[in-house]
Amino acid sequence: MGSETPRFLTLVDVAEVLNVTVRQVYALVRSGDLRGIQIGGRGQWRVEHVELEDYIQRQYARVESSLLDPDFEPDLDDQDLETTRRSD
């Protein structure tokens, strides 16, 4: 199989790609914002690679449409705020 991208990713893998916590990814799949499946007797979540890419594209589209709104004010998360403070 080599260096091919696996079809299914764990929530840990998804969290790493998105640079967020596993808890945040879990909330995304539980809410249906990010499509995932549960497998096995313990109901472990898996996210198909194409579903992750689709989610990312939807987020880009959401931001782009928000930027067209003249009343749009971005929400900065803690990491963005810390980066902003360091660059001042």
Image (tube, rainbow, N blue to C red):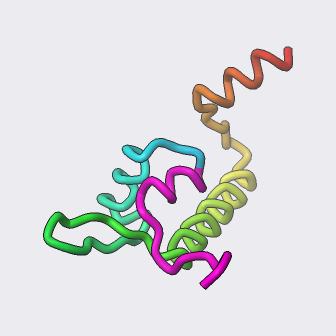
Task: Pick out the residue farthest to the bottom.
Answer: 1
Residue found at x 66% / y 53%: 66
Q: Is residue 71 above or below residue 44?
A: above
Quadrant where the C terminus sits is top right
Q: Nearer the viewer, residue 68 or 2?
A: 2
Q: Position of residue 81 (x, y in %)?
A: 67, 23
Q: Residue furthest front?
A: 2
Is 6 part of what is drawn in magenta? Answer: yes
Vertical relation: 27 (above or below) 46: above
Foreground residue among 69 and 75: 75
Q: Which residues are magenta?
A: 1-18
Above or below for 51 versus 1: above
Indicate left or right for 11 with 63 as reference: left
**Magenta includes 5?**
yes
**Residue found farthest to the left:** 41
Q: What's the residue at 55%, 79% (across, down)? A: 50
Residue 1 in the image: x percent, y percent? 60, 85
Q: Position of residue 36 (x, y in %)?
A: 37, 71
Which picture quadrant has residue 64?
bottom right
Q: Look at the picture and state if 31 lies above or below 80.
A: below
User: Where residue 56 appears, x then y in whole percent?
Assistant: 61, 64
Residue at the spot x=67%, y=43% of the render?
Answer: 72
Residue, far right = 88
- Judged left or right of residue 24, residue 78 is right
At x 47%, y 68%, the residue is 9
Query: Which quarter of the picture shows residue 37?
Result: bottom left
23 or 67, nearer to the observer: 23
